């Protein structure tokens, strides 16, 4: 699971990095880059879609609503799902308000893309650590350690912002730390939720 979620971080990493580049390019260059990217995605999807369409899908043995009702009253599933959902929501909310903070600090779109890319890089490292250290620590302990460092990184970021000491490198470094913490949380929480769903 850590390997899968690690590769998922490539999209936001490239998205923020190339988003800044596209903002500094001319309109024609930006549109051309988007067209090439869309063509690559379309061709890749078409290729894998044909392969997937040849396989027969298995039918569910249990009604969907019954399984969902069981999950919604399983405390371990709810706890793990909420943990993974919360840290993911915080990451995407930072992607919404941090551009304004970086703009206030005088960053260009290109600079913001590079600075914010620290979070997905940290996420990749956190998933790598989760894959190597997770089996020794266990799912719950690894997620707890990640949660502790996630709260610590956000708290320091908030304290710096309130004190007026937040600089672009400091924000980027804390985003990296937050990404590492998320890497420890998300995969382990998802596995914990899946395990709880199987037991429900």
Image (tube, rainbow, N blue to C red):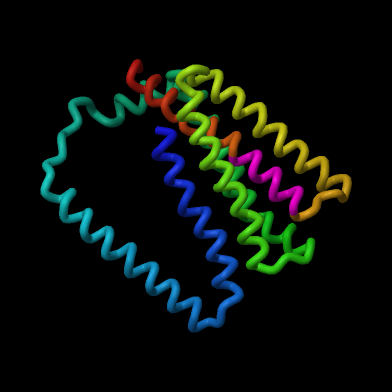
In the rendered view of the protein, which quadrant contains the C terminus? top left
Q: In the image as oriented, which residue stretches furthest toward the right?
A: 163
Q: What stretch is highlighted in magenta?
A: 169-179
Whether residue 101 is situated above or below residue 141 in the rendered picture: below
Which residue is more in the foreground, 74 or 131?
131
Instruction: Pinpoint residue 99: horizontal percent, then vertical percent.
Output: 67, 60
The vertical placement of 67 against 8, above or below, is above
Question: Relative to residue 101, is residue 89 drawn left or right?
Answer: left
Q: Residue at x 59, y 45 (%)?
A: 91
Q: Is residue 125 above or below residue 166?
A: above
Query: In the visual, does 49 lie left or right of 170?
Result: left
Image coordinates of residue 172 in percent, x first then y, are 69, 50
Q: In which quarter of the image is the N terminus?
A: top left
Residue 178 within the segment the image draws in magenta: yes
Identify which residue is drawn at 22% across, 25% down.
Answer: 62
Q: Residue furthest front?
A: 132
Please state which of residues 76 and 132 is positioned toward the viewer in this rendering.
132
* Main SS category, magenta section: helix
x then y, percent, for residue 154: 71, 39
Q: Reply yes or no: does residue 110 show up in magenta.
A: no
- Front residue of 80 and 144: 144
Q: Quadrant of residue 98?
A: bottom right
Name which residue lies at 54% across and 31% down.
184
Q: Where is residue 170 in the image (x, y as percent from the top left)?
A: 76, 48
Residue 39, quarter of picture: bottom left
The residue sitting at 16% across, 55% down in the picture is: 50
């Amino acid at each position: 699971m850590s390997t899968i979620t690690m590769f998922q971080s490539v999209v936001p990493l490239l998205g923020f990095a190339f988003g800044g580049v596209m903002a500094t390019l001319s309109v024609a260059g930006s549109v051309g880059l988007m067209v090439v990217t869309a063509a690559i995605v379309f061709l890749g999807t078409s290729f894998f879609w044909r392969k997937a369409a040849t396989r027969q899908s298995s039918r569910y043995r249990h009604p969907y609503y019954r399984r969902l009702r069981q999950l919604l009253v399983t405390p371990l599933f709810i706890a793990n799902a909420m943990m993974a959902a919360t840290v993911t929501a915080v990451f995407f909310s930072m992607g919404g308000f941090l551009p304004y903070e970086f703009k206030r600090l005088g960053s260009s779109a290109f600079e913001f893309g590079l600075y914010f890319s620290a979070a997905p890089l940290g996420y990749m490292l956190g998933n790598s650590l989760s894959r190597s250290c997770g089996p020794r620590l266990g799912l719950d302990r690894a997620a707890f350690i990640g949660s502790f460092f996630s709260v610590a990184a956000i708290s320091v970021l908030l304290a710096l912002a309130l004190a007026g000491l937040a600089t672009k490198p400091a924000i980027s470094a804390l985003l990296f730390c937050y990404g590492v913490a998320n890497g420890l949380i998300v995969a382990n929480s998802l596995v914990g939720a899946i395990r709880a769903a199987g037991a429900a």
